[in-house]
Image: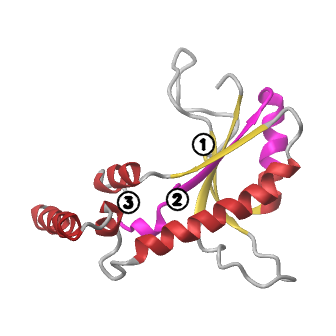
């Protein structure tokens, strides 16, 4: 609505005038300084996930990751698809690239053994929403949370959702 858009514009201008990153203007009003903590927490999550996942992959598989850029974060929030920026499920995301489609179930099992599943997209590995002639994005995405080891001091990462894409080299 117009009132919400005007409020968002005022936050953006205020951040610009104070020399603050736009990310600060896009977080929940109840936590206006949450963005730096979120970036730091996702950086810690990135290291923890990489440490767990990268070393368990087959030698022909590949791992890569990223933390969403400020511009990408802003575009996603401003699209209106997310009411709560704190619950953005792909602020941190990683990809496991496997040799071929027959490796995908094994990679999925590996990820699900390490992390807690929140959602799977597409919901089934058998069906896809795209036509066979289409090259639209429809790779397997697992939305998961970090599993804390009860034998170790908590890292405080289990509440941060993140995305794991699993695809082949040709996808």
- Give how far apart the Cα atoms at labels 3 and 2 are: 10 Å
Check if residue 151 falls in the magenta segment.
no
The residue located at (80%, 59%) in the rendering is: 52
> Could one spot residue 116 in this view of the protein?
no
The reply to whether dot 1 and dot 3 touch (C-beta < 8 Å) is: no
Q: Please tell me whether residue 37 is drawn above or below residue 107 in the rendered image.
A: below
- Give how far apart the Cα atoms at labels 2 and 1 are: 15 Å
The residue stretch that appears in magenta: 83-109
Q: Nearer the viewer, residue 147 or 31?
A: 31
Q: Is residue 147 left or right of residue 122?
A: right
What secondary structure is found at the residue carrying circle 3?
Answer: loop
Q: Please tell me whether residue 65 is drawn above or below residue 15 in the rendered image.
A: above
Q: Is residue 67 left or right of residue 31?
A: right
Front of the two marks 2 and 1: 2
Q: Please tell me whether residue 49 is drawn above or below residue 159 in the rendered image.
A: above
What secondary structure is found at the residue carrying circle 1?
Answer: loop
> Could one spot residue 151 in this view of the protein?
yes
Q: Earlier in the sequence, mark 2 or mark 1?
A: 2
Q: Position of residue 32 (x, y in %)?
A: 33, 78
The residue located at (71%, 26%) in the rendering is: 169
Q: Nearer the viewer, residue 100 or 24?
A: 24
Q: Say which residue label 2 marks.
A: 89
Q: Give me the disc on residue 122.
A: 1
């Amino acid at each position: 609505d117009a009132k919400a858009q005007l409020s968002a514009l005022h936050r953006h201008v205020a951040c610009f005038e104070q020399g603050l990153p736009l990310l600060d203007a896009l977080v929940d009003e109840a936590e206006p300084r949450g963005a730096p903590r979120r970036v730091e927490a996702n950086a810690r999550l990135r290291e923890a996930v990489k440490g767990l996942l990268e070393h368990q992959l087959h030698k022909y598989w590949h791992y890569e990751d990223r933390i969403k850029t400020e511009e990408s974060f802003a575009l996603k929030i401003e699209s209106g698809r997310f009411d709560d920026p704190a619950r953005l499920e792909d602020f941190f995301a990683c990809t496991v690239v496997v040799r071929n489609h027959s490796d995908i179930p094994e990679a999925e099992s590996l990820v699900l053994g390490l992390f807690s599943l929140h959602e799977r997209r597409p919901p089934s590995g058998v069906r896809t929403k795209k036509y066979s002639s289409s090259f639209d994005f429809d790779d397997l995405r697992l939305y998961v949370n970090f599993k804390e080891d009860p034998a170790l001091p908590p890292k405080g990462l289990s509440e941060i959702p993140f995305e794991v894409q699993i695809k082949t080299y040709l996808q």
